[in-house]
Image (cartoon, rainbow, N blue to C red):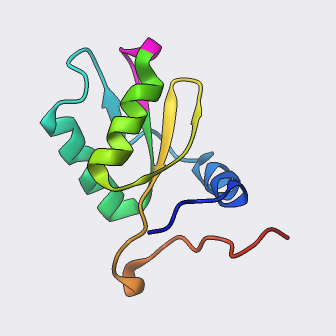
């Protein structure tokens, strides 16, 4: 998947507004189980929220680790929540259609 551009990130943040966090990063941090849960949630939904309950001071570094580990894209960080997107590889199962260009 190619890198997201600004207007695509903005569109994804708008779509994520109504979503509840799918995964919570707690005291144990980014364990293998947490990364597996994120991967499964992305497989099912394409766009998820990850809430940092603990480790709030290092949320940007943790978000970068999430997108690298899960082959995903970061749409943004709002407060203590990271919005993560990974396009469904099967075109028949895709729920999200990214805008091709602004306007």
Question: For residue 56, which quarter of the picture?
Answer: top left
Quarter of the image where the C terminus is located: bottom right
Establish if 49 lies above or below 87: above
Q: Residue at x 53, y 60 (%)?
A: 3
Establish if 47 lies above or below 65: below
- State the image coordinates of residue 16 (x, y, percent, origin top left): 58, 49
Establish if 29 lies above or below 101: above
Relative horizontal placement of residue 79, taking residue 40 as reference (left or right): right
- State the image coordinates of residue 72 (x, y, percent, origin top left): 39, 54
Frontmost residue, 81 versus 22: 81
Q: Residue furthest left?
A: 32
Q: Residue at x 65, y 59 (%)?
A: 5
Q: Residue at x 34, y 82 (%)?
A: 90
Question: For residue 98, which quarter of the picture?
Answer: bottom right
Q: How many marks?
A: 0
Does the magenta-highlighted stretch encompass residue 54?
yes
Question: For residue 17, which quarter of the picture?
Answer: top right
Quarter of the image where the N terminus is located: bottom left
Relative horizontal placement of residue 74, taking residue 41 as reference (left or right): right
Q: Residue at x 51, y 24 (%)?
A: 80
Q: What is the span of residues highlighted in magenta in the rendered image?
A: 51-57
Establish if 51 lies above or below 86: above
- State the image coordinates of residue 55 (x, y, percent, origin top left): 37, 15
- State the image coordinates of residue 81 (x, y, percent, origin top left): 50, 31
Q: Residue furthest right?
A: 103
Q: Residue furthest bottom?
A: 92
């Amino acid at each position: 998947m190619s890198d997201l551009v600004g207007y695509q990130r903005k569109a994804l943040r708008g779509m994520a507004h109504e979503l509840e966090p799918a995964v919570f990063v707690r005291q144990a941090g980014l364990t293998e189980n947490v990364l597996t849960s994120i991967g499964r949630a992305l497989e099912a939904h394409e766009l998820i929220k990850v809430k940092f309950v603990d480790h709030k001071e290092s949320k940007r570094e943790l978000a970068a680790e999430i997108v690298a580990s899960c082959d995903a894209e970061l749409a943004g960080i709002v407060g203590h929540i990271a919005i993560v997107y990974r396009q469904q590889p099967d075109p028949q199962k895709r729920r999200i259609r990214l805008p091709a260009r602004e306007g």
